[in-house]
Image (cartoon, rainbow, N blue to C red):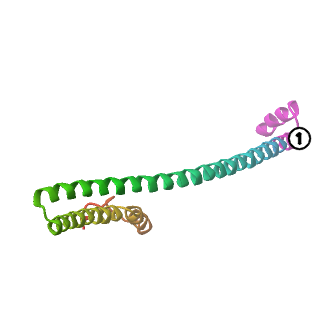
Amino acid sequence: MAESRDTEPQQTASEPLPEKVMAQLTEIAALLSLTAEQYKQQTQITKQTASAEMALSRRSLMLAAGLLVALGAGVVMLWGSVLVFAGYLLFQATASIPLTAALLFVLQVLVLYWCLRNMRYSLKQVGFSNTIAQVKGILRFTAEPAGGNSVNRSVD
């Protein structure tokens, strides 16, 4: 009984309990409303940012594609010039058009093979095999070494 007498004077000295609870619930509701409004504003700002980034990315990709075409044309012109110069030197050395043409053809085939081999190697590096392996490991709840299959990739 002494405990109930101790709590009664505290309640009577301050606001009654139902009014305190209502005030706290009102404050919580106001904070939740403010939080929801700020979350809505944040999602709108995020949407605006995403659309602006998409527009910039689209422009950048178009510009990069144009520059890639220009670079490709420059490389073709450079390689053509190298072949013409090498052909001139070979013709001066051998004085034979068929031999010069054959050597230039072999040179062109070797460069194309080198390009194809490097392209295959580069394309083997593309993908998410390590990520997929880690996700599978998580789903199976097993421990697998990270990057286990990337070590044994061949050049071919």
Which residue is situated farthest in the top direction here? Answer: 13
Assess disc 1: are there few (<14), some (14-19) or many (≥20) residues with their C-alpha within 10 Å of its C-alpha. few
The residue positioned 17% from the left and 66% from the top of the image is 97
Q: Quadrant of the N terminus?
A: top right
How many numbered circles are shown? 1
Answer whether residue 18 is magenta in the image.
yes
Q: Nearer the viewer, residue 85 or 70?
A: 85
Answer whether residue 82 is magenta in the image.
no
Q: Is residue 24 left or right of 52 when viewed as pictured?
A: right
Residue 123's place in the image compared with 40, above or below, is: below
Secondary structure beneath dot 1 equals helix
x and y, in percent, of residue 123 in the image? 35, 64
Q: Quadrant of the C terminus?
A: bottom left
Q: Is residue 15 left or right of 65 when viewed as pictured?
A: right
Q: Is residue 51 left or right of 93 when viewed as pictured?
A: right
Residue 84's place in the image compared with 129, above or below, is: above
Q: Quadrant of residue 79?
A: bottom left
x and y, in percent, of residue 153 in the image? 26, 64
Which residue is situated farthest in the front direction here? Answer: 95
x and y, in percent, of residue 144 in the image? 33, 63
Q: Which residue is mark 1?
A: 19
Q: Amino acid at mark 1?
A: Glu
Q: Nearer the viewer, residue 106 or 29?
A: 106
Q: Main secondary structure of the magenta part?
A: helix
Q: Nearer the viewer, residue 140 or 146?
A: 146
Q: Nearer the viewer, residue 81 or 133?
A: 81
Identify the magenta region.
1-24
Visible residue check, residue 143 = no
Visible residue check, residue 99 = yes
Residue 111's place in the image compared with 63, above or below, is: below
